[in-house]
Image (cartoon, helix red, strand yellow):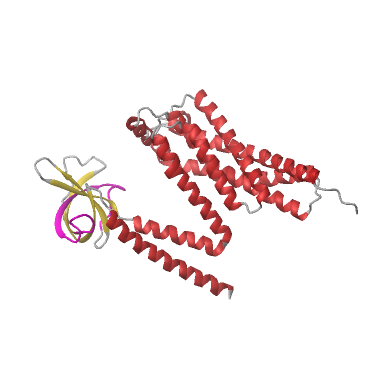
């Protein structure tokens, strides 16, 4: 019966996800109001012109493709007509065009009234929404209320960042104080949703924020001694050009604060949960024994978390590392690159944050347990 119940819930999750997909599909099409782009469906694909032989050594070249399309958004929704679209070809470039699929069409209109069309990207928003809902539904099916609480904390964290931190940072608020404020709200929301023992929430919150503070201090020292400006990378340069008054080094440090928060929360909550279970199992456990047990639990969790943290940062910097290596840089040249230096700052600062979270959380929990025992009435046996 238990397996049938799970299968039924998975089927229900699939139906809900399908409903979300179709709902998102029609809602996005109705709400799409971009002036220079349309969502279109490709009805037929004609011949494409061969790339120019004059620049055959270029890695990316443009071709023209005859397309029959039907417009799905805007004032021309429902119209079908033929166009000639300009597409980029080359290794890993452009968008693979297939009949019956939906794409984002961009039109560049010139002064003489002529237009140049190109397929900018696939139309994937409804699929993304459907898959997210299905993954969330699966989490709730197999994890129950714990999964619901985890999703609630995640939703609050994303809302805090996307609708709180990012708009305020774009308006010119100092990035580092704003990051610590966001970290506090995210940590508080996560601890409140995930830690079900109310008396342990302050401990998990305090230990996690202590780890974040340690990560920030090490990151600040490294950026000063290594003379990192925070301008390495195309996105950072674009941000500095678009918003010239932005403190790019502050943005780098704010990224360290936010990025390290997830890992230190994991360690802090794991230690708090383990120590709470120990106290519940043996209320008279000696405090030194309780502290050492929590420290050992944190040390074992730390091994896997550091591996996860370092590999995540190495993976994010892998494309630029390959480019630098392809340019002929040796190991020391790779280490001297500012982009790699920024990723090292993220990795090492996050590692120190994890290290500091262990003694901070175990000490706070032990002190709280000591205060509880001192206030407890003495019973005569």
Relative horizontal placement of residue 114, taking residue 346 as reference (left or right): left
Q: Quick check: is 87 in the magenta stretch?
A: yes
Residue 96 in magenta? yes
Image location of residue 345, percent across then percent down: 51, 33
Q: Is residue 110 above or below residue 101?
A: above
Against 333, residue 204 (above or below) is: below
Rendered location of residue 59, percent (x, y): 26, 42
* Count of numbered labels shown in the rendering: 0
In this view, which residue lies farthest toward the bottom? Answer: 1
Q: Can you say which quadrant of the picture contains the N terminus?
A: bottom right
In this picture, residue 188 sits left or right of residue 97? right
Work out whether residue 148 or residue 45 is closer to the camera in this orientation and state it.
Answer: 148
Residue 330 visible within the image: no
Looking at the image, residue 71 sits to the left or right of residue 121; the answer is: left
Q: Is residue 308 visible?
A: yes
Residue 55 lies in what quarter of the image? top left
The residue closer to the viewer here, 162 or 323, is 162
Chain part drawn in magenta? 70-97
Instruction: State left or right for residue 264 relative to residue 8.
Output: right
The residue at the point 37 percent across, 33 percent down is 327
Residue 362 spot, x, y in % from top left? 70, 42
Question: Compared with residue 20, is residue 291 higher up or lower down, i.e. above or below?
Answer: above
Location of residue 150 (image quadrant): bottom right
**Residue that appears at 30% across and 61% down:** 26
Q: Where residue 332 sits in the image (x, y, percent)?
A: 48, 29
Quadrant location of the C terminus in the rendered image: bottom right
């Amino acid at each position: 019966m238990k397996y049938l119940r799970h299968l039924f819930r998975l089927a229900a999750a699939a139906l809900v996800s399908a409903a979300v997909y179709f709902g998102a599909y029609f809602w996005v099409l109705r709400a799409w109001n971009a002036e220079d782009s349309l969502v279109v469906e490709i009805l037929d694909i004609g011949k494409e012109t061969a790339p120019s032989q004059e620049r055959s050594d270029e890695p990316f070249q443009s071709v023209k493709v005859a397309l029959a399309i039907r417009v799905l958004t805007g004032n021309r929704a429902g119209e079908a007509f033929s166009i000639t679209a300009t597409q980029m070809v080359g290794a890993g470039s452009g968008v693979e065009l297939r009949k019956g699929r939906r794409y984002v069409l961009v039109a560049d209109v010139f002064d003489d009234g002529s237009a140049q069309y190109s397929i900018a990207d696939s139309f994937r928003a409804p699929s993304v929404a459907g898959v997210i809902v299905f993954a969330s539904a699966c989490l709730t099916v197999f994890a129950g209320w714990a999964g619901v609480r985890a999703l609630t904390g995640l939703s609050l964290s994303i809302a805090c960042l996307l609708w709180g931190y990012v708009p305020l940072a774009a308006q010119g608020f100092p990035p580092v104080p704003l990051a610590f404020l966001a970290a506090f709200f995210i940590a508080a929301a996560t601890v409140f949703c995930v830690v079900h023992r109310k008396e342990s929430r302050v401990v998990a919150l305090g230990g996690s924020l202590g780890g974040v503070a340690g990560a920030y201090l090490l990151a600040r020292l490294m950026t000063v001694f290594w003379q990192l400006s925070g301008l390495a990378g195309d996105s950072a340069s674009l941000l500095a050009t678009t918003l010239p008054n932005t403190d790019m080094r502050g943005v780098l440090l704010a990224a360290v604060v936010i990025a390290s928060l997830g890992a230190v929360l994991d360690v802090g909550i794991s230690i708090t949960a383990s120590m709470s279970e120990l106290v519940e199992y043996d209320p008279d456990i000696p405090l030194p024994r309780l502290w050492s047990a929590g420290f050992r639990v944190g040390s074992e969790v730390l091994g896997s978390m550091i591996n996860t943290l370092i590999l995540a940062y190495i993976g994010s910097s892998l494309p630029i590392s390959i480019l630098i290596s392809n340019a002929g840089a040796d190991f020391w040249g790779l280490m001297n690159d500012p982009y790699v230096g920024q990723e090292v700052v993220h990795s090492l600062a996050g590692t120190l944050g994890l290290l500091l979270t262990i003694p901070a959380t175990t000490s706070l929990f032990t002190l709280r347990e000591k205060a509880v025992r001192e206030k407890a009435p003495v019973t005569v046996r």
